Image (cartoon, rainbow, N blue to C red):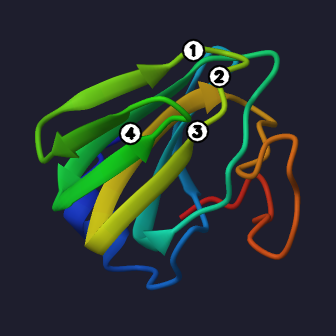
Amino acid sequence: MSAINFQEKFSRFSERWSPKVIAEMNDYQFKLVRLHGEFVWHQHADTDEVFIVIEGAMTLRFRDHEVPLRAGELYVVPKGVEHQPFAADECKVMLVEPKGVINTGDTGGSLTAQNDVWI
């Protein structure tokens, strides 16, 4: 076992909106994802979702407000709350969520990523 380096892991993929698993703890996965542009409005009925910005800036949009996030900041989206991630420029993010969570939640569609892809 060795330390996990975020930048080295990010260098292994360029796809956007396609989370990659880098570690597991109990039933939770730590995933890296590149964001750019607008994602779909969605929710996760059974779990909270953690966004940790590693590099860049993003906004979590909610129906009645927005939460801007910069490198070094995190936000927990409560379960069942509809949200839309947005990044004007590419942003590198770590997600923390239970194993098996679908990135597009209840919405589905063309941005639904394959689950459990490790890098």
In primary-sequence order, the first of circles 4 and 1 is 4
Answer few, some or many: residues within 10 Å of disc 2's Cα (few below 14, many 20 plus, some between 14 and 19): some
Q: Residue at x 79, y 64 (%)?
A: 112
Q: Residue at x 41, y 42 (%)?
A: 60
Identify residue for label 1. 78
Identify residue for label 4. 1
In primary-sequence order, the first of circles 3 and 1 is 1
Evaluate if marks 2 and 3 touch, with contact meaning CB atoms under 8 Å apart.
yes
Separation of marks 2 and 1 at Cα, in angstroms? 6 Å
Camera-near label (2 vs 1) is 2
Answer few, some or many: residues within 10 Å of disc 4's Cα (few below 14, many 20 plus, some between 14 and 19): few
Answer few, some or many: residues within 10 Å of disc 1's Cα (few below 14, many 20 plus, some between 14 and 19): some
Evaluate if marks 4 and 1 touch, with contact meaning CB atoms under 8 Å apart.
no
Camera-near label (3 vs 1) is 3
Give left or right: position of 21 versus 56: right
Residue 1 higher or lower than 84, as above or below: above
Callout 1 amino acid: Pro
Separation of marks 4 and 2 at Cα, in angstroms? 37 Å
Residue 118 is at least partly visible in this image: yes
| Disc 4 secondary structure class | loop
Identify residue for label 3. 83
| Disc 3 secondary structure class | loop
Camera-near label (4 vs 2) is 2
Separation of marks 4 and 1 at Cα, in angstroms? 33 Å
